[in-house]
Image (cartoon, rainbow, N blue to C red):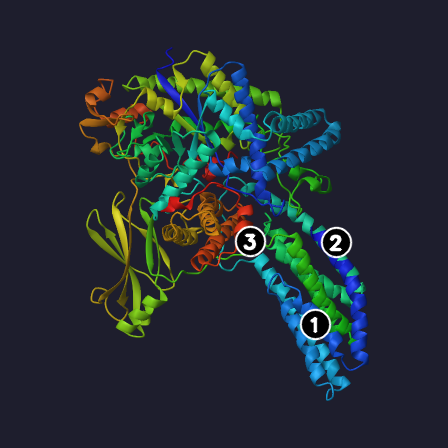
């Protein structure tokens, strides 16, 4: 699709060039003809833009500038005309470079999320992915060479065509941003080649002196091309929207989850409204003079543990002593300038309840009578242990488990590195 | 020997996350489906067919998760799979010419050409692009017991902060099953075997009779199970739980002693996608030029280190047969020993990812075929059974509450809740709360734009909740893609949430995202009430 897009844009460019030359020639030779200019600007402004981009602003400026020239036509000299056109083209090239920079940033780095750390192998692609990355070390060099060749060829052509490539590149990238490539190298490769093109383009535009006529041409052509390419994209591509996760939801909440039998995870937030209320009640410097604490409540065994934390965090991993207990977490604050046990405690919010999982076989808790239920009828019966264990030589469940699992020590006979689909050890190499 | 002394229950869990990108063919993640169809689902169906033709009775339990069902049923993905096969056939034809210098390589290239050609014939001509009908046939014929799963494989122990979201995962999963199989499922594969006792009431509500758990899901139950994992337990709510057997799992899964590591088996990581000349393979790898697996692999494992030898089909088959015999003998001994101390027939539960058979372990489907034939024909003290059959035959089950557990690494929630992915949970929980809020604010909406928008919210939430994204982030594979999916679904959900609340629903937006997230066509958002 991108090849077709660039072909169509190229053919449109040629048509626009012819028209633009005629119009700019009129503009420069005489004092600006209001009707011709406003027609051109009206065309630019009445076309619908797919996204709010710099092109819209450029279209507005293009609309504005001729009007200014019109109202001041008696006062403005030829010199002032030149300066305005130069300013306009500089703005346009700046905006192009800004757009491409922004898109490069999006492609290369996602700053809203925590950085990734190297991970162990897992299903299904990790080893394959590293192999892919190794292989692409060869290919990008070749591709880079090809890219630099094309940019060199591009620089040999007129400056106006290089500017157009910049116009086409951001649009194509805007589409590609939402795609996935499996190799980070591939995306950085695109980013570097695009930045090389952009650099070449801006260098050319700043160092070469162009005549008034060609600058006008370039400006108008840029505006037209952008609006045409937007139209083309709108017709021929689905609009791919980019979403990001919000940093917070601005509500007071505390939630706790169990990661393992001995580790809980808690996250929280305090809404702006509640913050203001606390400041109102306890002073404007409340959050500066206090520090957050987590009260870890074991509802089963009836004790509370206090964990001081800090305001840089909005989540925490808590190590607990007792699996199989019901826990809840309370978020509060205490004063910094007072000893821990003397400071008043200010309650903020309590979490949901969570039951920490069990982590061992509960053989010591087996009762003499075992309860059975009929899965179809829900009828309940009880069996004695002696009826349950067939072999009369086995007197307890520890011994029974040793026979069932053919092991000496039932507490150590299996590990929880489960050989499952999620386990790195499930790869066979 | 008496075949009713004990039982062996194979459970194959076939699942892939929902990946559907009509906007582009460049997503490599879509290849997972095509590889799974070629290497697992078609080979399994062909082996089931052989067993049926040979009049070998077998019983096997299989999960076909809702996202997988919708992908197999998707016309665009079916078309793309055919295109994938045709490309592979073209590549194989080139390979036959390229490898003409070496007789062994050439034989292998001809094998792959025949294999992919046959896949195309089976998919297009035999099953008319509808593989689901194939599995349904074997269920209706009494060979398979197909069970369901959570709607998008959402991990219950973490989602349970909002119970309605877990109820919806179960409800939509059951609804999807009914759509494709015309009846209610008896069992459910809890996503990642993530068990929470509080979810039992919802399982009961939707008619589920049993779940599968990890070994310690049963062993750490309260009270302790008298027979360990060799008998199921039943929760106070009435849901039966079957736990994985440790010994048989190790024989298949273990990276050290497991069957798939045998030196005669095909080496997964030697693929022509990486081995051959770049210009030659370029039309058959990723469009952005990144080398990928093609599925055409010429080497066997050979050894842990050193050079790899060419793959030999016959040696691989011989090894599979030998190992099927080993597994068979081990089960006879195991059940014989267990039956001496148990007053009910022991059951050895063997759950695996379906993709192990064929994709990771290329010879796996053939191993299963040989094993099932041996169990049927040879003298042994056990027969194949499904959990549903076991409940029918032995309904009195020890009452005990299974342990909160999973089959992820280390047995609990670490894979889906750790420092690499814990940022996502507040967003998933918030979206869950908002969905419940919307469902209660606009109950029983009539057909129209708002109802469509509410249903689409439900879809986006379900897709965001997929445990696959968190799993992928932890394992560091397609991390960018997984993060992008979470952002997209939460982003779309949030946008729609505000549009609904402000009564400014964008019809094109709803239509547009439904065209992409083309799943759960008959969903009803009221399930969140």
Asked whether B383 or A67 is in front, the reply is A67
Report the disc number at residue A146: 2
State how far apart marks 1 and 2 are (Cα). Answer: 39 Å
Question: Mark 2 falls on what kind of element?
Answer: helix
Disc 1 to disc 2: CB gap under 8 Å: no
Give me the C-alpha separation between circle 3 and circle 2. 41 Å
Location of residue B19 in the rendering, given as x and y in whole percent from the top left corner: 54, 43
Residue that label 1 marks: A41
> Tag 2: Cα neighbours inside 10 Å, few (<14), some, or many (≥20)?
few
Between disc 3 and disc 2, the foreground one is: 3
Residue A397: quarter of image: top left
| B83 lies left or right of A116 | right
Q: Residue at x 64, y 36 (%)?
A: B84
Give the chain letter at badge 2: A
For mark 1, does the 10 Å Cα neighbourhood hold few (<14), some (14 to 19), or many (20 or more) residues? Answer: many
- Are labels 3 and 2 on one chain? no
Q: Cβ–Cβ below 8 Å for labels 3 and 2?
A: no
Comparing B327 with B152, the one in front is: B152
- The residue identified by callout 3 is B508
């Amino acid at each position: 699709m991108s090849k077709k897009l660039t072909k169509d844009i190229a053919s449109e460019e040629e048509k626009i060039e012819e028209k633009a030359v005629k119009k700019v020639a009129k503009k420069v030779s005489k004092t600006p003809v209001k009707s011709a200019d406003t027609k051109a600007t009206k065309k630019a402004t009445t076309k619908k833009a797919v996204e709010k981009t710099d092109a819209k602003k450029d279209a507005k400026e293009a609309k504005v500038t001729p009007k200014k020239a019109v109202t001041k036509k008696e006062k403005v000299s030829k010199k002032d005309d030149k300066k305005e056109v130069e300013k306009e083209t500089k703005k346009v090239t700046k905006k192009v470079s800004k757009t491409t920079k922004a898109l490069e940033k999006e492609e290369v780095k996602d700053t809203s999320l925590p950085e990734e750390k190297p991970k162990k192998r897992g299903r299904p692609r990790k080893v394959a992915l590293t192999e892919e990355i190794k292989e692409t070390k060869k290919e990008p060099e070749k591709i880079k060479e090809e890219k630099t060749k094309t940019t060199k060829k591009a620089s040999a052509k007129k400056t106006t065509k290089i500017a157009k490539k910049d116009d086409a590149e951001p649009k194509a990238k805007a589409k590609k941003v939402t795609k996935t490539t499996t190799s980070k190298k591939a995306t950085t490769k695109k980013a570097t080649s695009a930045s090389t093109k952009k650099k070449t383009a801006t260098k050319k535009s700043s160092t070469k002196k162009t005549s008034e006529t060609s600058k006008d041409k370039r400006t108008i052509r840029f505006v037209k091309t952008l609006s045409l390419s937007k139209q083309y994209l709108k017709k021929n591509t689905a609009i791919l929207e980019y979403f990001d996760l919000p940093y917070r939801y601005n509500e007071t909440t505390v939630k706790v989850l169990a990661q393992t039998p001995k580790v809980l995870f808690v996250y929280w937030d305090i809404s702006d409204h509640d913050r203001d209320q606390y400041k109102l009640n306890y002073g404007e410097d409340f959050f500066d003079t206090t520090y957050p604490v987590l009260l870890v409540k074991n509802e089963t065994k009836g004790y509370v543990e206090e964990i001081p934390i800090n305001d840089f965090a909005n989540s925490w991993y808590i190590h607990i002593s007792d699996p199989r207990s019901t826990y809840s977490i309370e978020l509060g604050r205490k004063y910094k300038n007072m000893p821990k046990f003397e400071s008043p405690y200010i309650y903020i919010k309590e979490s949901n309840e969570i039951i920490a999982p069990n982590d061992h076989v509960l053989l010591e808790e087996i009762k003499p009578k075992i309860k059975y239920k009929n899965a179809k009828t829900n009828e309940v019966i009880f069996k004695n242990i002696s009826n349950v264990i067939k072999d009369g030589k086995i007197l307890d469940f520890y011994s029974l488990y040793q026979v069932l699992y053919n092991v000496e020590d039932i507490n150590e006979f299996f590990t929880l590195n489960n050989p499952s689909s999620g386990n790195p050890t499930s790869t066979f190499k | 020997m008496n075949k009713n002394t004990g039982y062996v229950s194979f459970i194959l869990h076939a699942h892939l996350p929902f990946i559907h990108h009509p906007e582009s063919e460049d997503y490599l993640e879509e290849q997972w489906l095509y590889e799974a169809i070629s290497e697992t689902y078609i080979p399994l169906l062909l082996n089931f067919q052989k067993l049926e033709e040979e009049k070998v009775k077998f019983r096997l339990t299989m999960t076909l998760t809702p996202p997988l069902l919708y992908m197999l049923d998707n016309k665009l993905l079916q078309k793309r799979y055919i295109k994938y096969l045709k490309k592979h056939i073209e590549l194989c034809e080139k390979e036959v010419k390229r490898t003409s210098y070496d007789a062994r390589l050439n034989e292998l290239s001809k094998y792959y050409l025949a294999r992919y050609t046959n896949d195309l014939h089976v998919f297009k001509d035999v099953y008319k692009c509808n593989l689901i009908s194939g599995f349904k046939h074997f269920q209706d014929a009494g060979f398979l017991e197909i069970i369901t799963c959570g709607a998008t494989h959402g991990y219950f122990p973490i989602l349970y902060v909002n119970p309605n979201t877990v109820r919806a995962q179960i409800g939509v999963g059951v609804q999807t099953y009914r759509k494709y199989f015309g009846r209610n499922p008896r069992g459910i594969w809890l996503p990642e075997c993530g068990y929470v006792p509080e979810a039992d009431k919802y399982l009961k509500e939707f008619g589920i009779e049993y779940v599968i758990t990890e070994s310690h899901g049963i062993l750490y139950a309260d009270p302790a199970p008298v027979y360990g994992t060799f008998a199921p337990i039943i929760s106070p709510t009435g849901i039966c739980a079957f736990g994985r057997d440790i010994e048989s799992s190790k024989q298949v899964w273990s990276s050290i002693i497991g069957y798939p590591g045998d030196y005669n088996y095909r080496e997964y990581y030697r693929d022509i996608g990486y081995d051959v000349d770049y210009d030659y393979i370029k039309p058959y790898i990723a469009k952005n030029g990144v080398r990928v697996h093609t599925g055409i692999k010429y080497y066997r494992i050979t050894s842990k280190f050193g050079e790899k030898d060419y793959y030999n089909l016959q040696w691989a088959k011989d090894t599979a047969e030998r190992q099927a015999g080993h597994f068979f003998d081990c089960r006879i001994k195991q059940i014989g020993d267990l039956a001496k101390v148990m007053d009910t027939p022991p059951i050895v539960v063997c759950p695996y990812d379906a993709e192990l058979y064929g994709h990771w372990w290329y010879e796996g489907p053939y191993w299963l075929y040989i094993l099932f034939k041996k169990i049927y024909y040879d003298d042994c003290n056990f027969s194949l059974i499904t959990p549903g059959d076991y409940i029918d035959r032995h309904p009195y089950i020890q009452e005990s509450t299974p342990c909160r557990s999973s089959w992820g690494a280390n047995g609990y929630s670490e894979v889906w809740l750790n420092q690499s992915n814990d940022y996502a949970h507040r967003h998933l929980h918030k979206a869950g709360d908002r969905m419940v809020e919307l469902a209660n604010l606009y109950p029983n909406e009539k057909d129209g734009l708002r109802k469509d928008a509410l249903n689409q919210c439900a879809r986006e939430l379900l897709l965001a909740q997929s445990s696959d994204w968190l799993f992928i982030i932890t394992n560091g594979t397609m991390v960018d893609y997984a993060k992008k999916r979470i952002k997209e679904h939460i982003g779309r959900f949030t946008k729609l949430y505000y549009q609904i609340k402000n009564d400014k629903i964008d019809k094109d937006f709803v239509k547009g995202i439904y065209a992409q997230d083309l799943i759960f066509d008959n969903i009803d958002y009221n399930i969140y009430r």
